[in-house]
Amino acid sequence: MDKILVDTNVLIDYSKGKDALLGRLLEKQKQMKVELFVNPIIVAEFLTDRNCQKPTVLDKANEFLRLFSFVSIGKRESVLAGELLRTGAIDFIGDAFIGATCLVNELSLYTKNQKHFKKIKRLVLV
């Protein structure tokens, strides 16, 4: 079964009706052909939308996030994120944690910002 971490930009596009591929992946997840994940960085970024100040919007966003399995960030991910930043494989701390989460947990990454992640060796981009 394919395991895919879904980046924030994909979640945002899908929630605005702009990403059909995520819809197809969610269907494949229902058929147990793929498992979709988010991590704490992605959840925090997704919930920064000011519209989430409205309780109904926040409830809907949290309900949407429940469609995804949650993968935590621990020491291994943190050490690797530091290495990715230190070696210049990635420029942003949030992206470093996203990339490290994928590598440590053997997940592919579905992102619209592939250029941010292209220097990370062994990272499979969807």
Image (spheres, grey):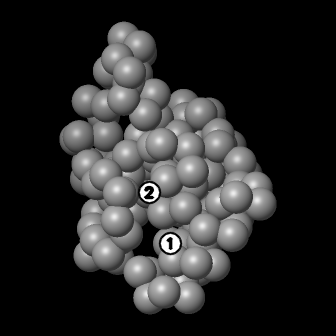
On the picture, is 8 further left or further right than 120?
right
- Neighbour class for label 1 at 10 Å: few (<14), some, many (≥20)? many
Q: Which residue lies under the disc numbered 2?
A: 7
89 up-or-down from 108: above or below: below
On the picture, is 11 further left or further right than 105?
left
Q: Which residue lies under the disc numbered 1?
A: 95
> Percent x, y for residue 41?
63, 63
Say whether disc 2 or disc 1 marks the residue closer to the N-terminus: 2
Q: Which amino acid does label 1 sit on?
A: Asp
- SS type, badge 1: helix
Dot in front, 2 or 1:
1
Q: Which residue is drawn at 35% across and 17% down?
A: 33
Residue 26, visible in the rendered structure: no
> Percent x, y for residue 65?
59, 41
29 up-or-down from 119: above or below: above
Residue 111, visible in the rendered structure: yes
> Percent x, y for residue 76?
70, 58
Q: Which amino acid does label 2 sit on?
A: Asp
> Percent x, y for residue 68?
55, 35
Q: Which residue is drawn at 34% across and 65% down?
A: 121
Residue most extreme to the right: 75
